[in-house]
Amino acid sequence: MTAAHAPKGWLNACDTRALVLGRVLEIPLPSETDRPLTALLVRDGKGCPRAYLNLCQHLPIPLDAGGGRFLSADGSHLVCQTHGAAYRLSDGVCERGPCLGKVLVALLVQERAGRLFIKCP
Ligand code: FES
């Protein structure tokens, strides 16, 4: 995998420096339906990049409900803005809310040559 090209099925998401602690990047994914599909790219508490589908596990709607807000006030969880489900950054497990114990759909992430690549679902 080179910096400029991603193998089939992988998305060249961003410069690794663009993903700073406490920030979420929303990355458009290829979709075979008329519904837009995005990934959420975030660094967990240890600085490891994680990617999840932007899809709540309570109802199949985006976590931000279109508002562009994803993190809890302390930056420790991805939070669904509709009913408040709070998902751990490190593994996507819901720790609070109506889908307690369910897990966000994780996508593989690779960091190479200063770029972050996401494996498309
Ligand atoms: S739709 Fe996300 S918690 Fe209900």
Image (cartoon, rainbow, N blue to C red):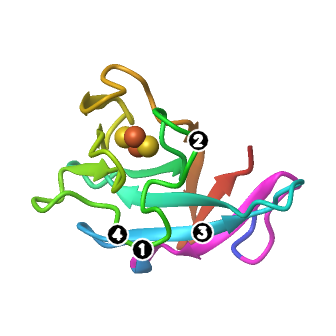
Give the magenta-colored segment's residue range: 4-17
Farthest left residue?
Answer: 74
Near mark 2 (Cα within 10 A), the count class, few <14, some 14-19 or many ≥20, is few
**Quarter in which the C terminus is drawn:** top right
Numbered label attached to residue 27: 3
From the image, tell me which residue sits under label 4.
Answer: 69
- At 49% from the left and 59% from the top, the residue drawn is 40
Numbered label attached to residue 99: none
The mark that comes first in sequence, 2 or 3, is 3
Query: Is residue 64 left or right of 107 when viewed as pictured?
Result: left
Per the model, the C-alpha gap separating discs 2 and 1 is 17 Å
Disc 3 to disc 4: CB gap under 8 Å: no
Disc 2 to disc 3: CB gap under 8 Å: no
The mark that comes first in sequence, 3 or 4, is 3
Kindly identify the amino acid type of the residue bearing the numbered disc 1.
Answer: Gly
Per the model, the C-alpha gap separating discs 3 and 1 is 12 Å
Numbered label attached to residue 68: 1
From the image, tell me which residue sits under label 2.
Answer: 60
Q: What element carries label 3?
A: strand
**Percent x, y of residue 75:** 18, 59
Q: Is mark 2 on a helix, strand or loop?
A: loop
Q: Is residue 79 above or below residue 112?
A: above
Per the model, the C-alpha gap separating discs 3 and 4 is 14 Å
- Tag in front: 3 or 4: 4
The mark that comes first in sequence, 3 or 1, is 3
**Quarter in which the N terminus is drawn:** bottom right
Per the model, the C-alpha gap separating discs 4 and 2 is 17 Å
Disc 1 to disc 4: CB gap under 8 Å: yes
